[in-house]
Image (spheres, grey):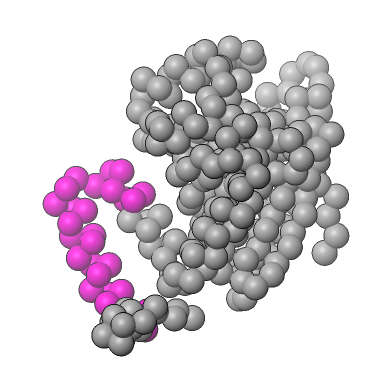
């Protein structure tokens, strides 16, 4: 399949999806979002894919909305429709992908670009990269595409409010210190480190990402006794899986497990 705004490469069980519209710093235009959703559908249907690596081309990860395409006048209704029909489903596509997702933030992640990165299971960023929420101080808008849900859970309400109201750049190193992302690495090492993470995740049980996502998601609303029951339910089912049996065999045979 040919794409204009992204690149998709699948090799040895790893899909690499690159946002590729450098003239706009990979802004999430309607065509780019459509192509990302098409690529995610391809990945979902390809049984050979066991992990996804999401990144950006050239100097940016994603600069957020393509404001020039909005024009003037009253556009609220059309933007709201686009978010409900395209942008929000894109985020859900990422979070419901049946394989683990690694985001390699190679440069600026601004506005909704932050939300796209945080939709991944593990986020790693280049040392020169940064995160910036420009919605409120520059546009009078709130963060979207899930950022208002993600940020306070990851870094706390005080920091989430500060980033939202001030719109300051959060350097990748500080983002890692705050717990917003998994790690910050030297620029030259970013893709190598991200690929290594994707390969490690590709070797995990096929259901690992979905199960972990669901467990942490329900924990947000369950009280402690209910979450204990949830864990017992899932363990009761998962312990009957071939993945568990292979893990036990590998442990007893003192070798690395080989999951299908």
Quadrant for the N terminus, please: bottom right
Does residue 79 appear to the left or right of 233 in the view shown? right
- Please provide percent x and percent y for residue 229: 18, 60
Q: Main secondary structure of the magenta part?
A: helix
Q: Residue at x 50, y 19 (%)?
A: 164
* Of the pair 151 and 149, the residue shown nearer to us: 151
Does residue 123 appear to the left or right of 225 in the view shown? right
Is residue 190 in sight in this rendering? yes
Total marks drawn? 0
Q: Residue at x 39, y 78 (%)?
A: 256
Q: Residue at x 46, y 28 (%)?
A: 174
- Please provide percent x and percent y for residue 177: 41, 32
- Please provide percent x and percent y for residue 201: 49, 64
Does residue 17 appear to the left or right of 221 in the view shown? right
- Quadrant of the rendered image containing residue 13: bottom right
- Quadrant of the rendered image containing residue 21: top right
Q: Is 14 placed above or below 137 here?
A: below
Q: Residue at x 48, y 51 (%)?
A: 121
- Please provide percent x and percent y for residue 52: 60, 59
Instruction: Residue 229: say if magenta.
Output: yes
* Of the pair 69 and 105, the residue shown nearer to us: 105
Does residue 70 appear to the left or right of 235 in the view shown? right
- Quadrant of the rendered image containing residue 43: bottom right
Instruction: Residue 234: say if magenta.
Output: yes
* Segment colored magenta: 216-243
* Of the pair 228 and 252, the residue shown nearer to us: 252
Q: Is 241 placed above or below 83 here?
A: below
Q: Is 174 placed above or below 256 here?
A: above
């Amino acid at each position: 399949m040919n794409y204009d705004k992204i690149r998709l490469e699948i090799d040895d069980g790893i899909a690499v999806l690159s946002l590729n519209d450098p003239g706009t710093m990979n802004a999430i235009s309607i065509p780019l979002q459509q192509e990302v959703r098409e690529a995610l559908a391809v990945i979902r249907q390809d049984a050979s894919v066991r992990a996804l690596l999401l990144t950006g081309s050239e100097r940016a990860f994603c600069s957020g909305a393509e404001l020039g395409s909005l024009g003037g006048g009253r556009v609220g209704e059309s933007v709201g429709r686009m978010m409900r029909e395209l942008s929000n489903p894109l985020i859900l596509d990422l979070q419901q992908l049946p394989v683990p997702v690694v985001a390699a933030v190679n440069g600026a992640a601004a506005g909704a670009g932050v939300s796209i990165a945080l939709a991944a299971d593990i986020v790693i960023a280049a040392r020169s990269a940064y995160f910036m929420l420009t919605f409120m101080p520059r546009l009078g808008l709130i963060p979207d595409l899930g950022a208002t849900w993600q940020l306070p859970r990851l870094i706390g309400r005080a920091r989430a409010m500060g980033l939202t109201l001030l719109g300051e750049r959060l350097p990748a190193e500080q983002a890692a210190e705050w717990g917003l992302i998994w790690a910050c690495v030297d620029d030259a090492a970013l893709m190598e480190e991200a690929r290594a993470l994707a390969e490690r995740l590709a070797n995990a049980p096929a259901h690992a990402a979905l199960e972990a996502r669901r467990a942490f998601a329900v924990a947000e609303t369950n009280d402690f006794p209910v979450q204990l029951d949830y864990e017992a339910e899932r363990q009761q089912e998962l312990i009957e899986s071939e993945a568990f049996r292979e893990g036990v065999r590998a442990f007893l045979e003192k070798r690395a497990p080989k999951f299908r």
